[in-house]
Amino acid sequence: MTILKFKLNQSDKSNFAKFNQNRNDIKKVFFSKSELTSILSLYSKQVSKGLWKDYALDSHSETAIFSVFRHTHDKPIYQIIKKRFKGIKNKCEFSILKDAALISKSSDLLIILNKLEKKLSIRKFQIN
């Protein structure tokens, strides 16, 4: 067995640093494709009704946040938060906040999205 030793030049060191920086992004929490599809489905329904106008996605080391806005330069109406538990890799908790008040919390995203959709449809009937 032969052991090879390589010398790194400056450009290789910078590429290695970029690789390590990208590895830190792996630790961040993101919405999966199916979760994002469910959220965007609800979002598109509300946009077509004219209730919601804009959204933003944020990703941090322990949370991912989908914020919904009524106007582009306003504070978020609703925030859908995915929070990862420390020490448990695939266990996440979802919650919905309205103006910093907790509306719903569950380990299943579809449950809280259904509750939010029902709440939005009830509000529609109360306005008329």
Image (cartoon, rainbow, N blue to C red):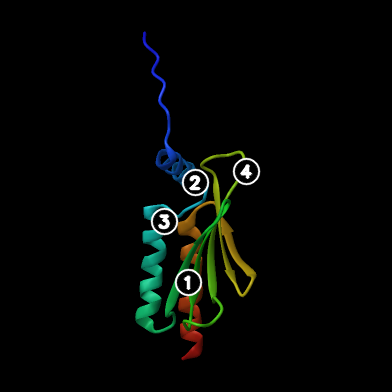
Against 56, residue 52 (above or below) is: below
Please tell me which residue is depicted at 54% across the width and 68% down the height of the picture: 79
Density class for disc 3 (Cα within 10 Å; few <14, some 14-19, many ≥20) is some
The crowding category of the residue bearing disc 4, from other C-alpha atoms within 10 Å (few below 14, some 14 to 19, many at least 20), is few
State the CA–CA distance, disc 3 to disc 1. 18 Å
Between discs 4 and 1, the one toward the N terminus: 4
Front: mark 4 or 3: 4
User: Is label 4 or label 1 in front?
Assistant: 4
Which kind of residue does numbered mark 1 sit on?
Answer: Lys
Which element carries disc 1, helix, strand or loop? helix
Vertical comparison of 46 with 12: above or below = below
Residue depth check, mark 2 versus mark 4: number of the one nearer the observer: 2
Q: Nearer the viewer, residue 44 or 72?
A: 72
Image location (x, y in percent) of residue 112: 51, 61
Image vertical order of residue 12 relative to residue 64, above or below = above
Q: Is residue 98 left or right of residue 31?
A: right
Q: CA distance from mark 4 to mark 1?
A: 32 Å
Residue indicated by mark 3:
35
Which residue in the protein does label 1 denote? Answer: 118
